[in-house]
Amino acid sequence: MSGQTKAVAEVAAVAAVDLGASSGRVMVGRVGPDTLTLDEVHRFPNRPVRVGGTLHWDVLALYQGIVEGLRAAGPVASVGVDSWAVDYGLLDADGALLGNPVHYRDARTEGIAHRVWQTVPAETLYAVTGIQYAPFNTLYQLIAAQGSAALAAARQALLIPDLMGYWLTGVAGTELTNASTTQLLDADIRMWSVELAERLGVDVGLFPALRQPGSRIGELRPEVLEEAGLRGPIPVTAVASHDTASAVVAVPAVGERFAYISTGTWSLAGLELERPVLSEASRLANFTNEAGIDGTVRYLRNIMGLWLLQECVREWEAERGGAGGESLSDAAAPAPVAPAPLDLPSLLAAAAKLQPLRSVIDAADPTFLAPGRMPGRIREACRATGQPVPVTPAEVTRCILDSLALAHRRAIEDAQRLADHPVDVVHIVGGGVHNALLCQLTADACGLPVVAGPAEAAALGNVLVQARALGVVGGLGEMRSLVARTQKLTRYEPAGDRAAWELAAARLDS
C-alpha cells in the first residue's frame, strides 16, 4: 500500500450533532494523523415554545433536524451528540416521552434552591457535589416537578443528548460529563449520591446507568437508517455530551498551566484539574466542579456571556423593524414587520472607539438571566451604581464587552487562587473567538496572552472523542496537538492601562 493510500485509509469521517440554545447543527468531521476538518452539512432552528405559561424545548423538532442532518451527512463511521446541560425528558413505562422538556430559563425553579437548603444546607450540598449554585440546576428542576403527574408517571429521566441517543439507538444511558452538572453526582467518586437524593426525595434511579465518554451507545435503529438514507451498521458513540466538556477537549493547550474560556451564549471560564476543589471558599466564589474526559475536572464559573449582547441585538433589531422590543422573550411570536438586520461588525467597530471602562456591570449577576428588555436592564444597573448610563447601541455594547472581560479576569484569578494552580495563558474557544474586541479586552484585563480558537470547539471535541473510539487518534494530549496544528488560532498580547482594569475591578467589588 502506498503512503498516500494509507493516509487516506486512516482518515475517518464522523457525524457530530451539536445542539445549542438557538440552533442545532450536524457537522461532518474528518480525522487523521494530520487531518482535522469540519463541514456543516445541516443547520436547524431551536425555537422554544411557551404553552400554558411554561417554556418548553421542542425536542421532536430537534430530533427531526438530526435525522435530516444525518441524511445530508451521508456515510459516516460514527455519530455523536452533544448539547447544553441540566435539562431532561421524562419517559413512561413504554419509553414514550411525557411532554416536551421544560426550558432551563423557565420560572418554575424560582425560590426552589432556598427550599432545598432548608433540608440540605448549601455548604453540605457543595461539599458532596461540587456544583455551583444556579437556579436552573437539574436538582432544582426535579424538586420543582415534585407532585406533578408527569413525574409521578415517569419511569426514566434522560438528559437531552441521552434522549436523542435513545431515540437514535433504543439504548438508554446517562453520559458522565452531563450527569455531573445535575447536582446529584458525588464529585469525588463520580457516582450518584443516593444518600443526598433520598434526603431530598429525588429518585436518582430514574436516570439509567452512567456511561463514559468514548463508550459505544448502540447502533442507529433500522428506521433511522431508512429515513436518513444510510446503510448500517453505524455506531452511536457517547461523546463528552455536555457541550462545554466537548469544547474543553478541543482547547489547543500545551501542558497544564492554562486557563480556558468557552464563549458563546455563556462564558465558562476556568481551569482543568485532576481533583475537584470542594472548599467552602470555592462554594462562596460560586465555582463548579464538572466532569471532563479521562478523569479531569472542569473547574469553572458560569458567566452570562454573549447572551447579554445577543439579547440587546435582538431588541434593537425588533425596534428597527417596528415591532418594539420590550416584550421579547424566548417564545415571542414573529414580529409583524421583519426586523432589519443589525450590522454587528460596524457596531463592534464603533464600540472599540469609545472610552474603555466608562460603565461596567456584573456579568455574572443572575439579574440578567431572563430574556427581554436587556438594554434597559443594563442601563438601570449602571444608573443604580452611580455610573454614566450608556445610551447608544455602541455604548451599551462597549459596557457589555468591558464587563465580560472583567468577569473573565475575576474568574481566572479566583480559580488560580482557590485551586492553587497558576496559569501562563488563556485559551478562548467557541463563538466568541470571532469577537476580536472581546478577545483583546480579555487579554488586557487578565494581563495574560490570549490564544483564540477554534471557534467550533464543541463540534471538534465531539469529533475527536468519536475518532479516538475508532482508534484514529490517541489521548487528550494528542487530540489537542492535532487541534493546534490544523486549526486557525489568533494570539492577543495584553495591552492598555493595567491600572484602569484594577480600578474597574475594585469598583465592581465595592
Image (cartoon, grey):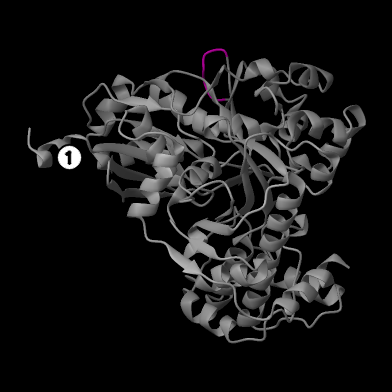
Taking the image as shown, residue 42 lies to the left or right of residue 49, namely left
Farthest residue, direction left: 1
* Residue 385 place in picture, x, y as percent: 86, 74
Residue 95 painted magenta: yes
At x 54%, y 49%, the residue is 21
* Residue 436 place in picture, x, y as percent: 50, 71
Taking the image as shown, residue 154 lies to the left or right of residue 45, namely right
Taking the image as shown, residue 30 lies to the left or right of residue 290, namely left
Q: Say which of 334 and 350 sits in front.
A: 350
The residue pinned by badge 1 equals 7
Location of the C terminus by quadrant is bottom right
Task: Give the total number of marks visible in the rendering.
Answer: 1
Farthest residue, direction right: 118
Residue 328 painted magenta: no
* Occupied quadrant, residue 470: top left
Q: Report the magenta residues as a range.
A: 93-97
Is residue 17 visible in the rendered image? The answer is no
* Occupied quadrant, residue 355: bottom right
Mark 1 Cα within 10 Å, few/some/many (few <14, many 20+)? Answer: some
Q: Say which of 191 and 416 sits in front.
A: 416
Is residue 156 visible in the rendered image? The answer is yes
At x 7%, y 37%, the residue is 2
Helix, strand or loop: magenta stretch: loop
Q: Is residue 508 above or below residue 260?
A: below
Inspect the image, locate mark 1, and give the three-letter code of the amino acid beneath it. Ala
Q: Is residue 485 above or below residue 241?
A: below
Q: Secondary structure at mark 1?
A: helix
Q: Is residue 257 above or below residue 450?
A: above
* Residue 426 place in picture, x, y as percent: 57, 58
* Residue 365 place in picture, x, y as percent: 77, 58
At x 71%, y 27%, the residue is 184
